[in-house]
Image: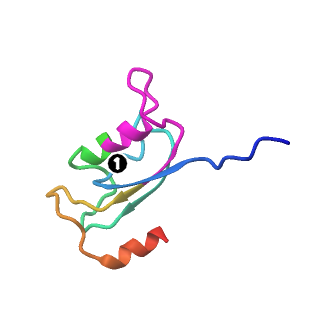
Amino acid sequence: MGQPEIPHPIMKIFDTGVRKDHPHIKNIKERTNWTHEPTLDDGLGHGSFVAGVVASSHNGCLGLAPDVDLYKLGAFEVACQVSSSHMKLQWLS
């Protein structure tokens, strides 16, 4: 018998945004903005940091899963306010 096929891993991160062309994160599959901010980028830096911990492909500091497909869900604004719409959680199902 052959080995069972293991699906490619994905990770969804709720945080501030992340730069689309981030040099250390190669598999950003989707970026969404659930805030009132006009950008998907990371004006705070926290979302990019978290994405790097998970998915960095930089040789000097690999993330925990550098080949993971990353879905970045911008749920926090630069002022660290959580977006208030509960309907957005339906995206997860």
Which residue extends farthest front? 1
Which residue extends farthest left? 79
Q: Position of residue 66 (x, y in %)?
A: 49, 35
Q: Quadrant of residue 21?
A: top left
Q: Is residue 67 left or right of residue 64?
A: right
Q: Which residue carries the number 1 mark?
A: 18
The magenta stretch spans residue 60: yes
Q: Position of residue 56 (x, y in %)?
A: 42, 34
Question: Which residue is painted at 14% across and 58% down in the image?
Answer: 79
Which residue extends farthest top? 60
Rendered-image quadrant of the N terminus = top right
Q: Inspect the image, locate mark 1, and give the three-letter code of the amino acid beneath it.
A: Val
**Label total for image:** 1
Q: Position of residue 62 (x, y in %)?
A: 42, 28
What's the magenta region?
50-71
Which residue extends farthest bottom? 87
- For the residue pair 63 and 36, the one nearer the viewer reads as 63
Question: Which residue is painted at 30% across and 58% down in the image?
Answer: 39
Q: Is residue 35 left or right of residue 54?
A: left
Question: Which residue is painted at 27% across and 67% down in the image?
Answer: 35
Q: Quadrant of residue 46?
A: top left
Within 10 angstroms of label 1, few (less than 14), some, or many (20 or more) residues? many
Q: Position of residue 71 (x, y in %)?
A: 45, 54
- Regarding mark 1 in the picture, which secondary structure is present there? loop
**82, above or below 86, in the image:** above
